[in-house]
Image: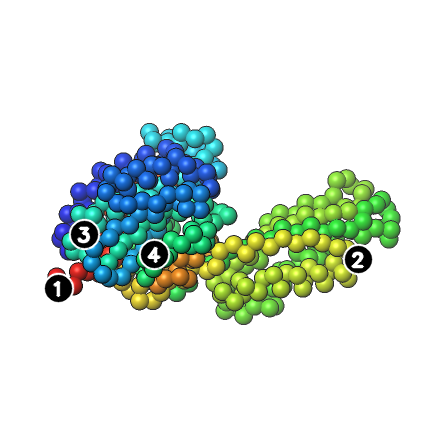
Amino acid sequence: MQDVKNAVAQQKDFVVKLRRDLHQIPETAFTEEKTSAYVTRVLEKLGLPVTTGIARFGVVAQLDTGRSGPVLMIRADMDALPIAEDTGLAFTSRHPGVMHACGHDAHMAMALGAAAALVQLKESLRGTVKFVFQPAEEGPGGAQPMIEAGVMENPKVDYAFGCHVWPDIPAGCVGVREGPLLASMGRFDLKIIGQGGHGAMPHQCVDALEIGCQVVSALQRIVSRQMNPLTPTVVTVGSFHAGSAFNIIAPEADLCGTLRTFERDIWQSWPQRLEKIIGGVCSAMGATYNLKLSPGYPPTINDADMAAVVRACARETVGPQKVVEPSPTMGGEDMSFFLEKAKGCFFCLGTGYRGGAPIHNAHFDFHEDMLGIGVEIYCRTALKLLARIGL
């Protein structure tokens, strides 16, 4: 395995350059034209066959060893966030109002670095490594369209891996967890339609604002009275707009919110639950409604065997004392779709340091020495699962 450390060490400056170049050209979901072109050029220079234009801007490259064996996928997301960067970095975003505030520049750089290192280590491998660069992780989601386009087939992916930089874990540590890691995420948009009128004559009206308040209260009881207290679930109404003046009863109310759970069956039950509750309240109060439910992403669940492989590789990379088990988070990730199609693991690369900003923040940054850790774990994982027979 010393060859792994040497191969990764040779990519150190290359990976840092990749991260800085990509950091300067952030693009939001399904607009990743420059990012896709940059990633494609790097992969082609490595001599890998590349397919582009998948789900608009997705990119897939394959390292075929020429020897039969499993197919391992390394996935990186490409999109950025609509945030004006305020880091003061020399390589700050050149796109006003857009920033890689969730570390996707790091994710791409690590996957590209792993591709470069594994090209050097090709003779130690069998099977195939697929490098998948996905658009629109931040929403509405690029994983499912890429799967529908066939990225998990021809050849069929056996193992799927991904990594997220994580400032809640100290820099230099690695977080690996089997089972649920991130929650499913869904969104609902609701319009309640009543009948407006004079504030002094409520008996002539159907008060959409008051009905909205009852809907909010009823939705909260999903968690408090319908769910097992030992099953983490979140229903949040994040926006509520109704009314235009102090003496006018609101004819309409607009609400939207998010739904989170680690249980796939609960995720699938949201349409029925919301329709029953909202329909019941509105019917009882004489209102009608329009409900739009976007199911979002399923929970991100790591296979136990694959988590054990990544944990072993992380221990070899940073030492056993720096490998931790992260707590599950109610955040969502569409890596979940890939993990429903193949055994795999989504792990966390610790980037936290004193005074550091959280992800999705205009000041977010990390120490670039961490990039080599992610590259090495990817390479060690590939070597463990695709080791050439007879070595």
Q: Kindly identify which residue carries mark 2.
A: 286
Going by the numbered disc 4, the residue's amino acid type is: Asn
Going by the numbered disc 2, the residue's amino acid type is: Gly
Q: In this view, does 227 lie above or below 87?
A: below
Q: Position of residue 107 (x, y in %)?
A: 34, 46
The answer to whether one can see residue 196 in this image is yes
Nearest the viewer among 300 and 248 is: 300
Q: Which of marks 1 and 3 is nearer the N terminus?
A: 3
Q: Kindly identify which residue carries mark 3.
A: 122
Q: Where is residue 223 in the image (x, y as percent from the top left)?
A: 58, 64
Q: Where is residue 46 in the image (x, y as percent from the top left)?
A: 23, 42
Which mark, residue 390?
1
Q: CB atoms at circles 1 and 3 under 8 Å apart?
A: no
The kind of secondary structure element at disc 2 is loop
Q: In this view, does 273 lie above or below 349?
A: below
Q: Which of marks 2 and 1 is nearer the N terminus?
A: 2
